[in-house]
Image: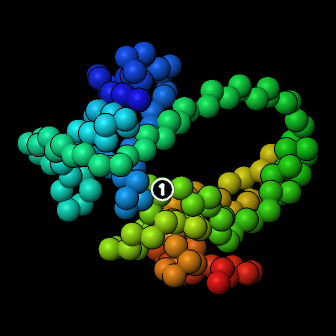
Amino acid sequence: MLAEAVCGRLYLDGVEQPVGSHGLLVDRATGRKIPFARKANTDTGEWEAWATDAGGEMEQPPRLLTGKGPIDFILSRLPVLPRPKQRLLSPAEEAAEIRTIRLDYGYQELLQVPGILCDEPRCQALAAYQTGSEQEIDPGVLPDGATCERAFTRKVQRWCPRHFRNPTFTNRRGVESEVEVTVRPQ
């Protein structure tokens, strides 16, 4: 299969793919992704990609790398989800719905896919867990006048079992603390 990226569009064997289509080029020998790939032929194993710097960003000025070896192209498409219909709630119903949202601290297990690596520097293991760092923001006011705590996810991190770290929570004063998970992965 010949995969080619031209002007932000993906072409597979010369056929333009739908908007939102993208893929991941993976070196089958090492299991690592080939970032910034622009052309690949999985039948011959030849590929072209833009060189990256130490931080993983594309080098400036751009420099083209070529290689040959066993490669896989994993196609993925962004799902187009229908927009949910809005329900009209009374202030009391809206406040009750907001209060039923439980705190879901902890970690989420990931399917180990080639190309999704551990965030620990110099670790090339596949990520098996995902945690988040949350930042507290000013409290919100519910329709019934009560206040509620609010936070947003600043960063999502992926870890292998060896380097797993607890999720963190930063309060409004900037104090960061680890959030204990109920069952730590082994």
**How many callouts does the rendering have?**
1
Residue 70: give x, y in percent of width and height: 35, 49
Residue 104: give x, y in percent of width and height: 73, 65
Q: In the rendered view, would you say 121 is above or below 154?
A: below
Quickly name the residue at label 1: 114
Q: In the rendered view, would you say 136 is above or below 62?
A: below
Identity of the residue furthest to the top in this view: 15
Mark 1 neighbour density, 10 Å: few (under 14) some (14–19) many (20 or more): many
Between 136 and 56, the one lying in front of the other is 56
Q: In the rendered view, would you say 128 is above or below 150?
A: below
Q: Can residue 186 be seen?
A: yes
Which quarter of the figure is the N terminus placed in? top left
**Looking at the picture, which amino acid does disc 1 mark?**
Pro
Identity of the residue furthest to the front in this view: 44
Q: Is residue 44 left or right of residue 10?
A: left
Residue 49: give x, y in percent of width and height: 23, 41
Query: Residue drawn 32% across and 74% down?
Result: 122
Residue 2: quarter of image: top left
Q: Is residue 72 left or right of residue 134?
A: left
Between 33 and 81, the one lying in front of the other is 33
Query: Residue drawn 24% across and 51% down?
Result: 57
Query: Residue drawn 74% across and 80% down?
Result: 182
Q: Is residue 80 left or right of residue 61?
A: right
Colour scheme used in the picture? rainbow
Between 119 and 35, the one lying in front of the other is 35
Identity of the residue furthest to the left in this view: 61
Residue 137: give x, y in percent of width and height: 56, 60
Which quarter of the figure is the C terminus placed in? bottom right
Q: Secondary structure at mark 1?
A: loop
Query: Residue drawn 67% across and 71% down?
Result: 106
Q: Can residue 170 be seen?
A: no
